[in-house]
Image (spheres, helix red, strand yellow):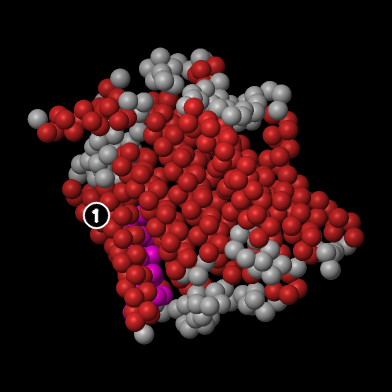
Amino acid sequence: MTQFEIYSVASVSLFGLGLFGLIALPNILRKILSFNVLGVGIFLFLVATAQRDDPTQPDPVPQAMVLTGIVVAVSVTAFALALLQRLHGETGMTMLDDEKAESDQ
Amino acid sequence: MGNHSDLRTTENALPRSLLRTLIAAGLTIAIAAMVGISMFQLPEGTAWPTPPARETLQESGVDQAVTAVLLNFRSYDTWLEVVVLLVAMLAVLTIRRQHHFALQQTDIFDDPVIRYFSRLVVPFMVLTSGYLLWLGTRLPGGAFQAGAVLAATLLLLVTAGQAKAGPVRSSRLLLLIVLAGFLAFSAVAIVNLGAGNPMLQYRSGREGLTILAIETAVTISIGLTLALLYFTGLASRNRVDSDSTHSMDHPYDPV
Amino acid sequence: MVNENLLRAFDIVLAISLVGLATMLLLAKDLFKSVVMFIVFGLLMSITWVRLSAPDIALAEAAIGAGLTGALLLRALRQLQPALISASEADTRLNEE
């Protein structure tokens, strides 16, 4: 197994985990964590590709994109957390769970 | 407040419906498998259609490829990146119903040991930030890393009660610092437009200096913006909450 | 080469830990544990970036991905649940009884 293969498999697993969490986990804070895991999976793939052909001379373009992406991810996380806290302040909700909302009515 | 049980920190992470979990898992595995298969079919050597940035590195004004990409070859990305941060921070200000920039919080971590060590460590953190910025022209480092260290420094300073800024008097100064990175890029663009050049072209022979100047502005912008993202809503929290109808249901307890 | 094999083994262990930790952090019952595991996950990612010859990203990940995101998450958790620790302790005690 080459290094590229190892980390590609890891990256697609992280992507899948994050996607699953984003869809399935009802707690919004967990959805935000899932979003971050999903993003890291994509970053990992970009960086693994950047050094696939020559690990001593990685392509700096995807690396720069990932660097930008990390900063965007943290600002989106801050935004999502602010939304979650406002939602909780207004309604007391921290979950997006249809069954629960129905049973509460 | 029947929904208060939502706040349990110990709970099952998965949805209660097993069927739902299984459908989501199945779909996710299918999508991930498709992505995974296509990953291994990428043709050799042509993963990135851009011309190799390394070959034109000498023209960029810096000796480090990632910095060259961020601040020269693809400087539009970084310009708009600063705008993204700005917009995110304005959105957070709006959602948290705060009308000014402020680096302060009501519940300061007042501990003599923390206070002493923060005083001891902060000068070195600022030094590290500056060093990372300077280093970024030759070795790994640069505006993003230096900005992050700067943000961490501000977090430590304010949380340990060593410094605060805002809400009214320093708000304009904070706004100026937040905008610094955007304004630095804009200044270059305006000068170039006046001279009839492409917008973000650096003057030949002065690339290194221009990049360092822009990077410095971007560093302090990123540092302050990231710190503001953390502190927004923590300052004068009680006053912000006083008009909220739910303030009694969800008291913010600073102790 | 022994060294090469050792590094490859390290890569495999690192990749497995990343995926395992991500699974654990998403499915942990205690949200506080989730957030702490997310911070550890960020630090592991930082090592991964070094392995993938991207030290620039490693520096940024350690400071932003692990540090600042962790601080933001802990702050949100604390405001959402002021009695965070006591509540989860009470729950554990309840479960044990």
Q: Nearest the camera: B205 or B200?
A: B205
**A85, above or below B149, in the image:** above
Residue B128 in the image, given as x and y percentages of width and height: 61, 51
Q: Residue at x 62, y 65 (%)?
A: B139
- Relative vertical location of residue B54 with respect to residue B164 in this rendering, above or below: below
Residue displayed at 70% across by 74% down: B57
Where is residue C35 shown, x and y percent of the image?
36, 43
Q: Is residue A17 magenta?
A: yes
Instruction: Give the extent of the magenta segment.
Output: A1-18
In the image, taking residue B115 as reference, residue C24 lies left or right, namely: left
Badge 1 local density, few (<14 within 10 Å), some, or many (20+)?
few
Main secondary structure along the magenta-highlighted residues: helix
Task: Name the amino acid, label 1.
Answer: Ile
Magenta region includes residue A87: no
Q: How many marks?
A: 1
Q: Is residue B217 left or right of residue B90?
A: right
Asked whether residue B92 is in view, the answer is no
Mark 1 falls on what kind of element? helix
Q: Residue at x 40, y 45 (%)?
A: A32
What chain is tagged by disc 1? B
Q: Residue at x 71, y 64 (%)?
A: B72
The quarter of the displayed image where residue C86 is located: top left
- Residue B156 quadrant: top right
| Residue B5 left/right relative to B98 | left
Query: Against C19, is A4 above or below?
Result: below
Q: Residue furthest right?
A: B195
Q: Which residue is mark 1?
A: B23
Residue B52 visible: yes
Q: Position of residue B67 (x, y in %)?
A: 65, 63
